[in-house]
Image (tube, helix red, strand yellow):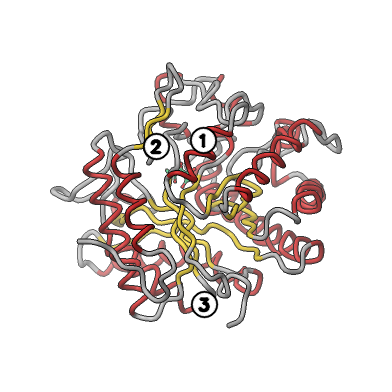
Amino acid sequence: MTTWLSSLPNFLWGASTSSHQIEGFTDNDWTRWEKSGHVADHTRSGRATDHFRNPDPDLQLFHQMGWNAYRLSLEWSRIEPEPGHFSATAMAQYRHILLTLRALGITPVVTLHHFTLPTWFADRGGFFCPAADTHFLTYVAYVVEKFRDLASLWITINEPMVYAVMGYGQGVWPPGQTSLIKTRRLARRLVALHRESYRRIKELAPHAMVGLAHHLAIFEPYTQSWTDKTLARFVDTSFNWRFVEEIDAYQDFFGLNYYTRQWLKTSHGLQPVTTKPGVPVTDMGWEIYPDGLYHLLMRASRYQKPILITENGIATEDDTQRQRFLLEHLDRVAAAQRDGAEIRGYLHWSALDNFEWAEGYRPRFGLIAVDYESLRRTPRDSALLYRAVIRANQNRSGPINVPR
Ligand code: GCO
């Protein structure tokens, strides 16, 4: 396979964020959702980490942490606050961010849609509106044309299945609907939209590498009963793999987000049980299960695309737990490489503590701690440990080397 990504000399090491979670003062469907009291403790994202107004110190810090890649998302609602009206100010600031990253030797990985929508688009029905494709593709073409000189790695949609399930199945994210049928229909629409976006980006930037960030989880039967096993297989196929199959011809790399394992129990229906008694969990209540990353990397490598781990991380107040999490997961990445998976990068979630959607600011996912009062940034020991791992692997080819 000779692709731009596989010809990259170095493994991509870095971390990920998304616009709404760090930028502050965005005006989109999530801002409205927060105002109507849907987030834990009535939290609003507010100024968040204030990154958009003042990005430079963060970008410098990312460089100091040894990263050669950084995944960010563009906030559609900032760029196109009214249909067809593009904000020169927002575009100039994103250009500045991309230019600064490049000057620091950091490869940007740019996500076009990370959960949030401009309110005008949400009001027309979001991705169900009849002109949804036209609107989204206009935005995509606009930003790709403006930034194709600065970015070559593009992610169209972040976690389409999570987006569909949370907003249209479980109703805990905007627009708060609870319909299985709509969840399925939305997933199908996003498949079509991804394919169209892929084509459009490749027309505008033929050398760009375009993919999607798939959220994959391990789904296992809670008991060994035939019904639990069947349910687990069904959820694994419909949540993890159906979308992947449908867009496989339209991705140049496989973007993989991995966090946890979940259990299926017939009495709970399609809603997985997040843990079993006695397993180690994060502050999100998610099981810590590094082997899951190995299994999913091996499974994803069947698609014969270079794999980019676009998210993997832990919410915890205890940084020693984060350090352990990091090493254990990197160790599983190395094992998958030794067993033949072509993995081209690891982007930890997250660069900074940030606004964790319906959970608000409580979960701490950052390699870099943020004091939300003073806005002071402090790299955690896990960030320093990560830097040591990155340094030890600089200019190495072959499987990464992870200290034990
Ligand atoms: C997601 C997103 C991130 C989250 C992260 C932790 O997976 O929901 O890509 O925005 O913040 O995964 O939950």
Q: Is residue 219 above or below residue 140?
A: below
Question: Of the residues shown, which amino acid type is indicated by label 3?
Answer: Tyr
Q: Residue at x 75, y 36 (%)?
A: 92
In this orientation, which residue lies closer to the viewer: 122 or 101? Answer: 101
The image shows residue 3 at horizontal and vertical percentages of 62, 76
Question: Of the residues shown, which amino acid type is indicated by label 1?
Answer: Asp
- Residue topped by disc 2: 368
State the CA–CA distance, disc 2 to disc 3.
Answer: 34 Å
Q: Residue at x 61, y 38 (%)?
A: 116
- Residue topped by disc 3: 303
10 Å crowding of disc 3: few (<14), some (14-19), many (20+) = some
Q: Is mark 3 within 8 Å of ligand 1?
A: no
State the CA–CA distance, disc 1 to disc 3.
Answer: 35 Å
Q: Can residue 228 be seen in the rendering of this structure?
A: no
Residue 58 numbered mark, or none: 1
- Residue closest to the far left: 278
10 Å crowding of disc 2: few (<14), some (14-19), many (20+) = many
Q: Residue at x 27, y 64 (%)?
A: 291
Looking at the image, residue 139 sits to the left or right of residue 272; the answer is: right
In this orientation, which residue lies closer to the viewer: 356 or 42? Answer: 356
